[in-house]
């Protein structure tokens, strides 16, 4: 069936253009229409611009790896956050992936360091604790005599289980906290779903 | 399904994958229409009204709009969320194990009320199950519950193994409790118990061999050989108890209950994988969880 679709595409587009559309379509969130629009846009750009784009893709793939300390994306063995001496060395914020780290960095509220797990425990997807960077985290906390570990993992059922699993593992070595969950700023109580409201009630705190 | 532009259903979320910028594609087992796949628009946004309701194992009353390729959730009202499943990794693995079995047998657009009810009852029981803090003791409680749930889901699918008689000769199986070396065969391809004496019959063996291919299971990509296994009298009795819908056998009489139920889980898993033609991914996590509980890894 795929073969037939490819043949149809080749009949409409010239072969290199069909190949480009096919490759773009592999990107997340890109359907056949968007792939066609992007391919035709790229064809209309100057060659130098296309070469810069292609080179940027290759460079990123070849040079970006994981920080040896926190597993965030980094072109150096140790990322900028971990090598920054002005950051609080005694606090580690644990996040599921690098996108979450970037979101927290954008708040400019947190001055400690991070640890990127590489996902959350999801048995159905074949992701167990051994597939994540949990063992290096425990070793790091033990080695660095960390004062506090903040668990900043999403409140999905898998995220909650990962949070609980980590807190049980880390509690013998350090203070473990988790970010609050509940109503978003500007959100109205009336429109909140039951699950979120229950979380908000569960995580209530005394007014100072 | 009728042909109006929307329909109402009560469903439990069994799977969710990100779709586009902020949507989720949910696989929902519904009481009225079997398995449906519907987009939860904007569910990954913090201010989404259906964000919490799109979580795994949340049961919702849904209003779903029909789409050209995918249906879209217009409204959702939570009935229960099974939040207690997150309090223990063993419970999550068990719940996801059952969810995989439910997904393997659920049909698109065909109501399967027995499947929906069985899964929900089992999840409800699992959520309420008090577990000791010691992980080995907790697993000792959890494994019989897991096996009982697998048994019920196999029975709902209509593929429960036949244990009372040999599936090759139809002779009744009668364990000899005085003989510690008594064994009975168990074959997924034959559909349950087989008299070991029947394996000496070349005709029966040829029949069995023809039905025991080495399968590559699509979801796991692993190759599994379904060769007959040998059960002790106690294992045979425990399996009988599971499928007789009576409580699991007297665990106090078992020398090593954890190993006993671990072996039965593996046996049922192979049986389920054979009949559903799919690997069970959660089983890998269960194995790791069991191994780390029995021999915790060294810190450094």
Image (cartoon, coloured by chain):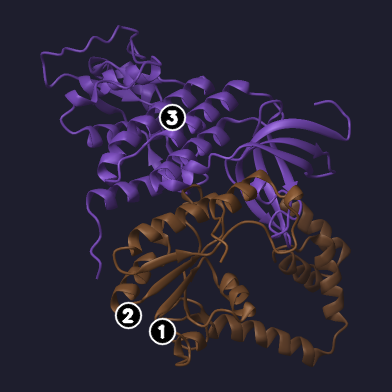
Chain colours: A brown, B purple
Q: How many marks?
A: 3
Residue B217 visible, this orientation: no
The correct choice, above or below, for A187 with respect to B283 in the image is below
Q: Is residue A102 left or right of residue B189?
A: right
- Write down the chain letter for disc 1: A
Q: CA distance from mark 3 to mark 1?
A: 48 Å
Residue that badge 3 annotates? B150
Q: Is residue A104 left or right of residue A47?
A: left
Residue neighbourhood size for the residue with mark 3, other residues' Cα within 10 Å, grouped as few (<14), some (14–19), many (≥20): many
Residue that badge 2 annotates? A144
Q: In percent of the image, x 50 and y 77: which residue is there?
A: A72
Verify CB contact (< 8 Å) between mark 3 and mark 1. no
Q: In percent of the image, x 78 and y 60: which residue is there?
A: A31
**Residue B218 coordinates in the image, percent (x, y):** 52, 44
Residue that badge 1 annotates? A89
Q: Nearer the viewer, residue A46 or A88?
A: A88
Residue neighbourhood size for the residue with mark 1, other residues' Cα within 10 Å, grouped as few (<14), some (14–19), many (≥20): some
Q: Nearer the viewer, mark 2 or mark 3?
A: 2
């Amino acid at each position: 069936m795929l073969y037939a679709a490819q043949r149809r595409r080749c009949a409409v587009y010239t072969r290199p253009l069909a190949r480009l559309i096919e490759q773009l379509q592999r990107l997340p969130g890109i359907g056949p229409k968007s792939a066609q629009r992007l391919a035709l846009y790229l064809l209309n750009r100057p060659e130098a611009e296309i070469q810069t784009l292609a080179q940027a893709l290759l460079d990123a793939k070849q040079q970006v790896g994981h920080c040896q300390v926190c597993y965030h994306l980094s072109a150096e063995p140790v990322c900028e956050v971990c090598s920054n001496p002005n950051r609080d060395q005694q606090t580690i914020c644990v996040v599921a992936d690098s996108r979450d780290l970037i979101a927290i960095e954008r708040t400019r509220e947190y001055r400690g360091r991070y640890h990127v797990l590489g996902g959350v425990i999801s048995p159905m997807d074949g992701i167990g604790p051994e597939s994540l960077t949990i063992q290096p985290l425990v070793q790091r906390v033990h080695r660095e005599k960390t004062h506090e570990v903040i668990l900043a993992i999403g409140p999905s059922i898998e995220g909650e289980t990962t949070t609980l699993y980590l807190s049980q593992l880390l509690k013998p070595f350090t203070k473990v906290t988790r970010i609050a969950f509940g109503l978003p700023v500007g959100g109205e109580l009336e429109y909140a779903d039951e699950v979120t409201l229950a979380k908000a009630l569960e995580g209530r705190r005394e007014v100072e | 399904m009728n042909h109006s532009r929307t329909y109402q259903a009560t469903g439990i979320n069994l799977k969710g994958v990100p779709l586009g910028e902020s949507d989720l594609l949910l696989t929902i087992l519904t009481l009225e229409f079997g398995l449906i796949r519907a987009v939860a628009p904007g569910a990954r946004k913090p201010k989404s009204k259906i964000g919490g309701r799109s979580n795994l194992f949340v049961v919702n009353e849904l209003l779903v709009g029909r789409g050209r390729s995918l249906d879209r959730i217009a409204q959702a009202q939570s009935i229960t969320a099974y939040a207690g499943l997150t309090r223990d990794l063993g419970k999550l693995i068990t719940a996801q194990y059952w969810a995989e079995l439910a997904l393997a047998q659920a049909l698109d657009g065909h109501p399967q009320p027995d499947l929906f009810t069985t899964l929900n009852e089992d999840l409800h029981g699992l959520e309420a199950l008090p577990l000791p803090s010691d992980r080995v003791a907790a697993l000792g409680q959890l494994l019989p519950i897991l096996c009982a749930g697998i048994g019920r889901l196999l029975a709902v699918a209509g593929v429960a193994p036949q244990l009372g008689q040999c599936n090759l000769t139809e002779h009744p199986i009668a364990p000899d409790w005085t003989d510690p070396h008594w064994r009975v065969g168990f074959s997924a391809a034959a559909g349950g118990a087989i008299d070991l004496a029947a394996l000496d019959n070349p005709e029966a063996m040829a029949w069995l061999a023809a039905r025991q291919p080495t399968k590559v299971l699509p979801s796991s990509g692993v190759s599994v050989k379904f060769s007959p296994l040998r059960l002790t009298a106690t294992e045979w009795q425990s399996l009988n108890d599971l499928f007789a819908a009576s409580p699991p056998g007297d665990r106090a009489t078992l020398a090593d209950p954890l190993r006993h139920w671990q072996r039965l889980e593996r046996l049922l898993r192979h049986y389920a994988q054979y009949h559903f033609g799919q690997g069970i991914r959660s089983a890998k996590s269960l194995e790791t969880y069991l191994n780390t509980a029995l021999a915790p890894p060294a810190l450094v």
